[in-house]
Image (cartoon, coloured by chain):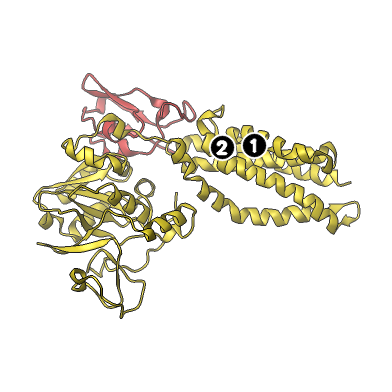
Amino acid sequence: MKDIRYLDDISSLVLTDEKCVGCGLCIEVCPHGVFEMQHNKARIVDFNACMECGACVNNCPSGALSVSPGVG
Amino acid sequence: MASPVQPRQTLSTPGVTILSGMDGQIPAGLPVSAAPLAAHEKPGYRMCSYVKTFIKTDAGHIPIITSLLGKADLFSTFYVRCGINRHQYTVAPGLYGIGEPDKTSDVLVTANFKLTFDHLRKALAHVNAWILVLDTNGVNVWCAAGKGTFSTRELVTRIKTTSLDKIVDHKRVIVPQLGATGVSAKDVKTQSGFRVVYGPIRANDIPVFLQNHRIADKQMRQITFSLYERFILTPVEIQMALKPSLIAIIALFILSGFGPGIFSFSGAWERGVLAVYALVAGIISGAIATPVLLPFIPSRAFALKGIIVGSIFAVLVLLPMANTINGIAGGLALFLFSVTISSYLAMNFTGATPFTSPSGVEHEMKQYIPVQLACLAISTGLWIYAAF
């Protein structure tokens, strides 16, 4: 999906580094490759690809992720 | 996203725990043909065509389904793709098997939209597995996960009601990756004892995923939105535009009748036809051309993509009719109208794509709906003015 992009700088995705336990589940569930593992922690590497589907938030075991989309 | 619809009564509706694989559409007294299935016939219920046989397990008889799609399946797929009856296209939730599943076989979780169910079984031609169908009111996995019916609660309930722990001797369910929007692996484990393994996005990747010891490579985890994937969605876009269009057409004919003699029926007809051309151009541009050409159109905002493509369509349709349109005001009115329709429908398509964020769509709507309304008002004014 690198060829089709939506609006930049608009996603409400927040990753709180200190809370990340490095389980890698966000990398597994994200359908847009937003995250990558760096130094045993998840990092946001493609913020503008996020579509706020909430899969990462729902599966993060330590509450390190949040999205707060509007009504759409 | 589809709206929730009450499912029709099925044999595995909560409280009526009999069997998945049957639905209750037709009255009793039908001829029994396939001998292995005869024992499972129930008065008032018809065996679903995809059920091949039944297998005895420690938790009762489970229907084994075929991976082959029959003519009827293909016809109904076509209808549903055209938007016909797509909100009532369901299979009974519950447990099914495919191939020759045993206690070690994997359990694949899916939704009870028949399009989803058919797509899954077609991909499992050489696989032995259990299929756990959740009740999502006939909505696909991703949309249902977003709306909360493909959920932790539904999965946990379904694991318990089907006595999955008696069917398999492992504690593992494979949930499609896109289901993660509605499922929390941690909560499923706590509440049911079963561990969620996220499978690939596409059902076609499941056989390779299973062979690779349930490891999905990066490509299996990334969503795509290819030309074909965009095109296949357009009939539903058209179908959804049909009803509002009929109302719009009536309004256009009435509006076109206003003129020097207050109202003229010949004016309504002659000018109304021109306005309908502009409407049709806008619909084709916004509901077909823009979705199909999506990545090739400049700009990120769908509404603006619709304006760009809509302008080209409007010029192409209106130019050949230039001498029948009343002056520049009339031409401008039709142009603005056609472009506005295209822009609105293109914006509407954000709801069908796999990459638009709700925050982005909200931002776009706040920006472009006022523009679209203003264009519509100016267009109406100009069209009436042009008649004088």
Q: Callout 1 environment at 10 Å: few (<14), some (14 to 19), or many (20+)?
A: many
User: Which residue is drawn at the image coordinates 32% and 39% (left, top)?
Assistant: A55
Badge 1 amino acid = Gly
Q: Describe the element under mark 1 as helix, strand or loop.
A: helix
Q: Which residue is depicted at the point 30% across and 65% down?
A: B48
Q: Position of residue B271 (x, y in %)?
A: 80, 50
Q: Which mark is residue B227?
A: none
Q: Quadrant of residue B178?
A: top left
Question: In x, y percent, where is residue A68?
Answer: 40, 37
State the residue lying farthest toward the top.
Answer: A39
Q: Which residue is mark 1?
A: B310
Which of the two labelled residues, at mark 2 and mark 1, occupies the earlier sequence position? Answer: 2
Q: Seen in the image, is B155 located left or right of residue A69? A: left
Left or right of B45 on screen, residue B235: right
Q: Position of residue B125 (x, y in %)?
A: 24, 49
| Tag 2 near tag 1, CB within 8 Å | yes
Q: Chain A drawn in what color?
A: red
Residue B10 seen by the camera: yes
Q: Taking B74 as reference, is A22 above or below it? A: above
Q: Colour of chain B?
A: yellow
- The chain holding disc 2 is B
Say which residue label 2 marks: B290
